[in-house]
């Protein structure tokens, strides 16, 4: 699994970075993503820094970064996911369109929460709380999508 900045920051902000380790064992980020997330004083800094130190968040780079008109982190993450034929954890709508165009499998942060319920890492009640905490921390989810997620979690 390759991760972009936003999912790491959002999960770290709400104390749920561990979901990545539980679901995937390890996650890879590019140097550009590392630069974006490891800004001292930025929310999630210590959690992400700790995960890198523990070795389950690893840093690697693609051989070539394809310029897609996105941010440095998105460009490098998409390039690496395409090159490595690996899934990408990303939330930016424009980057998701680029992933689709490149044939890169991707997951959103909210999809991770649903996966965590299915694999019994969190209860449905905890998942609803995580979704609400993400929204409270500034993660945007359209009302229609929130409704779909809550419906899925109540099944």
Image (cartoon, rainbow, N blue to C red):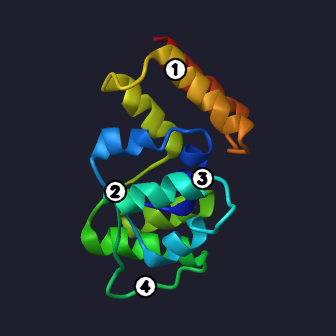
| Residue 83 placement (x, y as % from top left) | 29, 75
- Residue beneath label 2, please? 54
Badge 1 density bin: few <14, some 14–19, many ≥20, Cα 10 Å: few
Depth check, mark 1 against mark 2: the one in front is: 2
CA gap between label 1 and label 4 equals 38 Å
Give the labeled residue for mark 3. Answer: 44
Q: CA distance from mark 1 to mark 2?
A: 26 Å
The answer for how far apart the CA atoms under marks 2 and 4 are is 27 Å
Distance (Cα) linking label 3 and label 2? 15 Å
Label 2–label 4 contact, CB within 8 A: no
Q: Tell which circle, 1 or 2, labels the residue nearer the N-terminal end.
A: 2
| CA separation in Å, label 3 and label 4 | 26 Å
Q: Which residue is mark 1?
A: 126
The mark nearer the N terminus, 3 or 2, is 3
SS at badge 2: helix
* Coordinates of residue 151 in the picture (x, y in percent): 55, 17
Q: Which residue is mark 4?
A: 65
Q: Is residue 2 visible?
A: no
Q: Nearer the viewer, residue 87 or 61?
A: 61
Of helix, strand and loop, which one carries label 3?
loop
Classify mark 2: residues with Cα within 10 Å, few (<14), some (14-19) or many (20+): few
């Amino acid at each position: 699994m390759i991760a972009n900045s936003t999912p790491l920051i959002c999960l770290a902000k709400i104390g749920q970075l561990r979901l990545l380790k539980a679901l995937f064992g390890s996650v890879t980020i590019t140097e550009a993503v590392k630069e974006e997330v490891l800004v001292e004083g930025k929310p999630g800094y210590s959690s992400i820094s700790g995960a890198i130190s523990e070795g389950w968040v690893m840093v690697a780079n693609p051989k070539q970064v394809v310029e897609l008109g996105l941010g440095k982190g998105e460009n490098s993450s998409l390039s690496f996911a395409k090159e490595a034929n690996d899934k990408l954890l990303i939330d930016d709508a424009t980057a998701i369109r680029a992933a689709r165009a490149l044939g890169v499998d991707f997951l959103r942060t909210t999809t991770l929460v649903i996966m965590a319920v299915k694999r019994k890492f969190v209860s449905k009640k905890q998942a609803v709380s995580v979704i609400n905490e993400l929204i409270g921390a500034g993660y945007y989810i359209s009302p229609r999508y929130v409704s779909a997620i809550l419906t899925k979690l109540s099944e």
